[in-house]
Amino acid sequence: MLPREQERRRSLIYRAGLLADTGHYDGWRDIEAALLSAGREDASRNLASAHIQYALNRRCARAKRSLAQAAHCLVAPAIAAGTDGQTGHRL
């Protein structure tokens, strides 16, 4: 593999990891689709490794759990206080 191709591959995998960490994707296939729609025609080829797919799936799951916990931390105190959590209006 040429150095430029290696750098493109590294860049794509790095970007895939960043997408996984957002918590907005269910797994590597969703990330692949997002990268393909962004014009990265090499996404399928570079995400074909079972190791990369597993790692992306784990990062997606971890990020989704973190988002769910953060949402709970924001909403639960407001509910306990009897407010809607946004405007402060009583429930």
Image: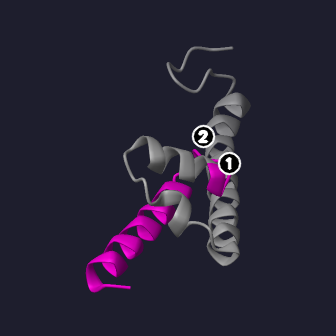
- Write the start and end of the magenta stretch as one range: 1-29
For residue 14, side relative to residue 64 (left or right): left
Q: Name the amino acid type tagged 2.
A: Leu
Residue at the image point whose x is 70% and y is 38% from the top: 76
| Residue located beneath label 1 in the image | 26
Residue 48 visible, this orientation: yes
Q: Nearer the viewer, residue 10 or 74?
A: 10
Return the disc, 1 or 2, that comes first in the chain's sequence.
Answer: 1
Q: Position of residue 57 (x, y in %)?
A: 69, 62
Residue at the image point whose x is 68% and y is 46% from the top: 68
Q: Position of residue 27 (x, y in %)?
A: 67, 54
| Residue located beneath label 2 in the image | 74
Dot 2 alpha-carbon crowd within 10 angstroms: few under 14, some 14 to 19, many 20 or more: few
Where disc 2 sits, the SS reads helix
Mark 1 or mark 2, which is nearer to you?
1
**Pointer 1 with pointer 2, Cβ within 8 A:** no
Q: Position of residue 30 (x, y in %)?
A: 61, 47
Q: Is residue 9 magenta?
A: yes
Residue 23 visible, this orientation: no
Q: Is residue 5 magenta?
A: yes
Rendered image quadrant of residue 51:
bottom right
Where disc 1 sits, the SS reads loop
The numbered dot on residue 38 is none
Whether residue 79 is situated above or below residue 21 in the rendered picture: above
The N terminus lies in quadrant: bottom left
Q: Name the amino acid type tagged 1.
A: Asp
Dot 1 alpha-carbon crowd within 10 angstroms: few under 14, some 14 to 19, many 20 or more: some
Q: Mostly what secondary structure, the magenta segment?
A: helix
